[in-house]
Image: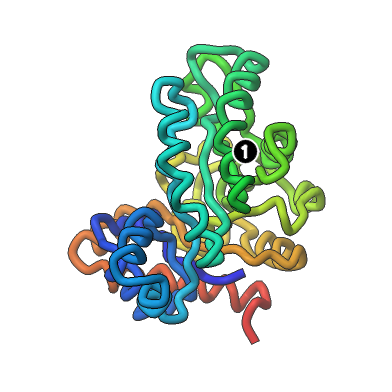
Amino acid sequence: MYSALIPGCIGIHGLNLADSIKIAREAGFEGVAFDIYEAKFYADEHGIDALKELFGGIIPGVWDTRVNWQDDATREASIEAMKPVLDLAQELGATNVTTGIMPANNERPYDEQYEFCKTRLAPLADALNAGGVRIGIEFITPKTLRDKFTYQFIYKMTDMLAFAKDTGSNVGVLFDVWHHYCAHGTLEDMDVLTAQDVQLVHTNDAPLGLEIDEQQDLSRCLPMETGVIPAVEMLRKLNTLGLNVGVGPEPFSKELNEIAAVDPLKAAKIAQEANEKLFVAAGLRG
């Protein structure tokens, strides 16, 4: 596993490819989430070697497929538009992408939602699989969010993993330590995971003074900031799988977002410092 800058996760927006890579490097990250469509344009203009030189040792991490797979009107065309970047993904070794599924909705009860999501995600998964790319689904958990909707759906990692395997051979999960905590997930639950099942890891912590079921989705903390989440143990467990995926901080911190708006590099350094403490504590360094 390697430390990855996911700019949007720490409030950094609007950067081009070169600036994202530059900030990742200067902040001390090992990899970066990137826009593969911009990368393809760059490679088409300057050549693949120039693109690799631009990354300059920073690992090309996850990328956005730009496919709204739940939208019947645009899904097929978006998948076709995505296919030309798959060769580049292989060339760069950037073979992990992610998506998410809400843990509840107002339209369909559980079984209907299951089929709705499975039949619509499968075509994207199939297209990615043909290009050697795996997709991880983020399981979204907090009860405070689920309770706002009529129908409950998947929110636990184990259930999402089962759904993923039912959807495609290249489908797994995005493992967020905060979501696993908010789902009352345990370290033992993680025994079902293999190295192929996890496509990205999000790190963070939870605010003090709240019960698990009181946690709010967009109110989190930097990794190891409060010690509420047993992230050290979770990361250590994930590391035993032999994962080769990015581990990126996603604190949803108002303070960090405010810093990122005026000084993206400073925000990235703060996030990386926290992430690095977690890596060290979990035994992933030296």
Asked whether 220 or 115 is in front, the reply is: 115
Local crowd at mark 1 within 10 Å, few (<14), some, or many (≥20)?
Answer: some
Q: Position of residue 203 (x, y in %)?
A: 53, 59
Q: Residue furthest bottom?
A: 286
Residue at point 37%, 59% (across, down): 40
- The amino acid at mark 1 is Asp
Q: Is residue 212 visible?
A: no
In the rendered view of the protein, which quadrant contains the C terminus?
bottom right
- Look at the image and name its color scheme: rainbow
Q: Residue 167's quadrant in the figure?
A: top right
Q: Give me the residue at 50% from left, 12% from top.
A: 107
Q: Quadrant of the N terminus?
A: bottom right
The answer to whether 93 appears left or right of 266 in the picture is right
Instruction: Give the residue drawn at x 41%, y 68%.
Output: 271
**Circle 1 — which element?**
helix
Q: Is residue 147 above or below residue 96?
A: above
Residue 126: percent from left, percent from top: 62, 38
Write down the residue under mark 1: 126
- How many marks do you count on the picture? 1
Give how far across and how far down residue 264 sits, in percent. Answer: 26, 67
Q: Nearer the viewer, residue 117 or 150?
A: 117
Residue 147 in sight in this render: yes
Left or right: residue 146 versus residue 25 is right
Instruction: In the displayed orientation, state which residue is furthest to the left.
Output: 262
* Of the pair 68 and 52, the residue shown nearer to us: 52
Image location (x, y in percent) of residue 120: 56, 26
- In the displayed structure, 3 sits above or below 124; it is below
Is residue 157 toward the left or the right of residue 99 in the image?
Answer: right
* Residue appearing at x 49%, y 72% in the figure: 59
